[in-house]
Image (cartoon, helix red, strand yellow):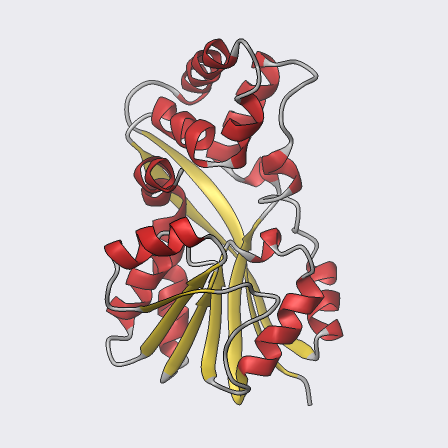
Amino acid sequence: MPEAYERHLVPVLFRPFAADLAARAAALRPGTVLELAAGTGALTSALLTAMPAAAVVASDLNETMVAAGSAREPRADWRRADAQRLPFEDGAFDLVVCQFGVMFFPDRPGAYTEVRRVLAPHGRFLFNSWGPLASHGFDAAFQAALEQSVPGAAPAFLTEVPHGYTDRSLVASDLAAAGLGLAAVEDVTLAGVAESAASVATGFLTGTPVGVALEARQDAQAVRSAVARRMTESLGPGPVTAAMTATVYTAHHRA
């Protein structure tokens, strides 16, 4: 899964926003940085390039992702860590940053409470989350192709998880419950460029829980082929470009 994720999805979906988030992080001039849900290190590399003097700890719950990330980006200190039980001292970091990870936290207020604990009094919590499914050209096309290919039985992973945390008032409420306040909120729309629609479909089908959900089907291979074909019909053959929208949040200790 990490290999498929890195090969097909990271360059298209995550690197454009990693550059954006790293630039915002660098403007804060942190000395110590903790990255949550670092995955295979797309943001980690961008952070270290933008802030070569910063001490960056990259963490992820998934041990396989930590192994893959540490091999790809050895400049960071990689740690396996549960965002809801962080193994770090109080006030240890000037900046906690998370790219497209908060949507996966089972207990967001609990995770944010841990962020507040490890954040220095002057520190910032910088993170982003995807906007509604319809605002993401690749994800929307994939989900539509999936629903056409398995009517009534399409996994709802994209809708419920990556695109399931779009209500700004809910995000603010979850942060407030953890003793954090919002300093800034901004929608950002960037372009993703893929070598083909089929490549993106392959990434979703082999590098995310969608693929796991489809494995039990006897017609799994036929479904994968149908999804790739329909996604290509929707976005076009050859290299494809699509707009993607995310919301960037900056939070801090509440007074």
Question: In the displayed structure, would residue 175 be above or below residue 29?
Answer: above
Q: Between residues 205 and 21, which one lies in front from this camera angle?
A: 205
Q: Measuring from the top left, give residue 146's x and y in whole percent.
A: 56, 20
Question: Image point 43% across, 12% down: which residue?
Answer: 225
Q: Between residues 243 and 207, which one lies in front from this camera angle?
A: 207
Q: Choose top left, top right, bottom left or bottom right for residue 152.
A: top right
Q: Measuring from the top left, give residue 109's x and y in whole percent.
A: 70, 67
Q: Choose top left, top right, bottom left or bottom right for residue 82.
A: bottom right
Q: Is residue 213 left or right of residue 151?
A: left
Question: In the displayed structure, would residue 225 be above or below residue 124?
Answer: above
Q: Choose top left, top right, bottom left or bottom right for residue 149.
A: top right
Question: In the displayed structure, would residue 113 be above or below residue 162?
Answer: below
Q: Measuring from the top left, give residue 211's x and y in whole percent.
A: 50, 28
Q: Measuring from the top left, give residue 75's x and y in whole percent.
A: 24, 68
Question: Image point 44% across, 67% down: which residue?
Answer: 35
Residue 75 can be seen in this image:
yes
Residue 29 can be seen in this image:
no
How many dots with numbers?
Answer: 0
Question: Image point 34% across, 51% down: which residue?
Answer: 15
Question: In the displayed structure, would residue 172 be above or below residue 41?
Answer: below
Which quarter of the figure is the N terminus placed in? top left
Which quarter of the figure is the C terminus placed in? bottom right
Q: Is residue 128 left or right of residue 182?
A: left
